[in-house]
């Protein structure tokens, strides 16, 4: 499990403060933390436990129950592949095999260059354009292995331009 530095912890403490009075605050806090720092650091869990007056084990339990929550820092690009019914009917299984092979990782893993993390999702609300994937905030429809290569090329070029 990964940890975050002092500055990150302060950011998380602020997030906890903003959400702890909500009913059922645990999930909103975890979502807000992951949205903010991309994962749930191990050293954030005692802060959450203390604020909500629950045990650390309870926080760990919730984090590990929901696959959505990451306990490791993800790659620069999180690629989510839809495994919903519509996408499966339109060939997402072939697409996911091609993506795993291309990136040399399985679901819930990050490529060795720390560029890509692969996650499954179950409907991106883009069924009319199945199969669909999401990279960051961008949803791509009618993706086949060839189109994925193009998307990846564009992503790589864009990343290089930013350096
Ligand atoms: S099932 Fe894939 S977008 Fe809906």
Image (cartoon, grey):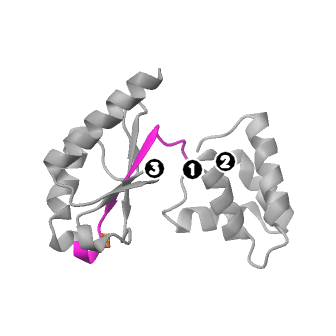
The residue singled out by tag 3 in the image is: 136
Residue at mark 2 to residue at mark 1: CA–CA distance: 7 Å
In the image, residue 157 lies in the stretch drawn in magenta = no
User: Which label sits in the foreground, 2 or 3?
Assistant: 3
Crowd rating for badge 2 (residues with CA inside 10 Å; few <14, some 14–19, many 20+): some
Q: Secondary structure at mark 3?
A: loop
Task: Tell which circle, 2 or 3, labels the residue nearer the N-terminal end.
Answer: 2
Residue 27 seen in the current view? yes
Note whether ligand 1 is within 8 Å of mark 2.
no
Q: What is the quadrant of residue 141 in the picture? A: bottom left
Q: Are marks 2 and 1 in contact (CB under 8 Å)?
A: yes
Residue 71's disc is 1
Residue with the mark numbered 2 = 42
- Left-right relation of 80 to 59: left
Q: Quadrant of the N terminus?
A: top right
Q: Are marks 2 and 3 in contact (CB under 8 Å)?
A: no
Give the residue drawn at x 81%, y 43%: 10
Q: Is 73 colored magenta in this rendering? A: yes
Could you tell me residue 85's position as x and y percent? Answer: 25, 77
Q: Which residues are magenta?
A: 72-86
Q: CA distance from mark 1 to mark 3?
A: 18 Å
Q: Tell me whether circle 1 and circle 3 mark residues in contact (CB < 8 Å).
A: no
Helix, strand, or loop for circle 2? helix
């Amino acid at each position: 499990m990964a940890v975050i530095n002092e500055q990150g912890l302060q950011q998380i403490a602020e997030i906890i403060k903003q959400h702890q009075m909500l009913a059922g605050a645990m999930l909103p806090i975890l979502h807000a933390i992951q949205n903010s720092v991309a994962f749930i650091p191990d050293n954030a869990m005692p802060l959450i436990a203390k604020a909500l007056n629950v045990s650390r084990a309870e926080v760990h339990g919730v984090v590990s129950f929901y696959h959505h929550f990451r306990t490791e820092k993800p790659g620069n690009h999180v690629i989510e592949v839809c495994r919903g019914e519509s996408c499966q009917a339109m060939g997402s299984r072939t697409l996911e095999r091609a993506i795993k092979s291309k990136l040399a990782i399985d679901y819930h893993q990050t490529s060795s260059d720390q560029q890509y993390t692969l996650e499954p999702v179950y409907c991106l609300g883009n069924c009319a354009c199945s199969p669909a994937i999401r990279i960051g905030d961008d949803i791509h429809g009618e993706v086949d292995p060839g189109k994925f290569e193009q998307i990846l090329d564009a992503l790589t070029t864009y990343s290089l331009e930013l350096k």
